[in-house]
Amino acid sequence: MVTLINHDKLEIDGKVFQTSEPGEDSSRNILIHDGVVYKIGCDDPDLSQDAEWLIWGVLSEQDKKYFAPVLEHGKNWVAMVYVEFTDSFDLPEREAMEIYDKIIAPLAKKYGIIDLDYGKNWGLRQDGTPVIYDYGIVEWQYKKLYLNCLR
């Protein structure tokens, strides 16, 4: 059982865990525990974690192999399978762009996902399959959260 204590603490099966601070260009604290990545939103608690959960729910079976699976979510947090990668994100830019153009960009367009950068939002699994592990920014959310703030 998972309980969000606050933006930087989770209780998992009776034990309290401290999350890491958000990385550069991130709005979420992260905790990796027992093969699961817990992402806790630091901004709008009503919107920040719904996108990955909703997208996972509508992915076709064929497309799911390209996404890190979502296990569960709650108000302002989401739990996903931790993905092991083949490299330290040192794929040559040309190869990364070919994979992006052929696989990642069409999936992003199909599901309304924006801002997918190699090494930041997607990488290669141990078997070489591309996997999107951070797909929490989608068009409807971006417009509501960010564009409205600029007006």
Image (spheres, rainbow, N blue to C red):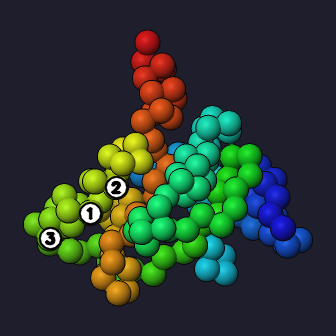
Spot occupied by residue 73 in the image (x, y as percentages of width and height): 70, 56
Residue situated in front as seen by the camera: 79 or 24: 79
Residue situated in front as seen by the camera: 60 or 20: 60
Q: Amino acid at mark 3?
A: Glu
Q: Residues within 10 Å of mark 2 (few under 14, many from 20)?
A: some
Asked whether the residues under the numbered discs 2 and 3 touch, taking CB atoms below 8 Å apart as contact, a structural biologist would say: no
Q: Residue lying at the far bottom in this picture: please name it.
A: 127
Q: CA distance from mark 2 to mark 3?
A: 18 Å
Spot occupied by residue 139 in the image (x, y as percentages of width and height): 42, 36
In-image side of 94 versus 139 (left or right): left
Q: Residue lying at the far right in this picture: please name it.
A: 14
Residue appearing at x 55%, y 68% in the figure? 69
* Residue 32 appears in the picture as rendered: no
Residue marked by disc 3: 95
Regarding mark 1 in the picture, which secondary structure is present there?
A: helix
Asked whether the residues under the numbered discs 1 and 2 touch, taking CB atoms below 8 Å apart as contact, a structural biologist would say: yes
Q: Residues within 10 Å of mark 3 (few under 14, many from 20)?
A: few
Residue marked by disc 1: 103
* Residue 33 appears in the picture as rendered: yes
Q: Amino acid at mark 1?
A: Ile
Residue situated in front as seen by the camera: 15 or 84: 84
> In which quadrant of the rendered view does residue 46 lie?
top right
Sequence-earlier tag: 3 or 1: 3
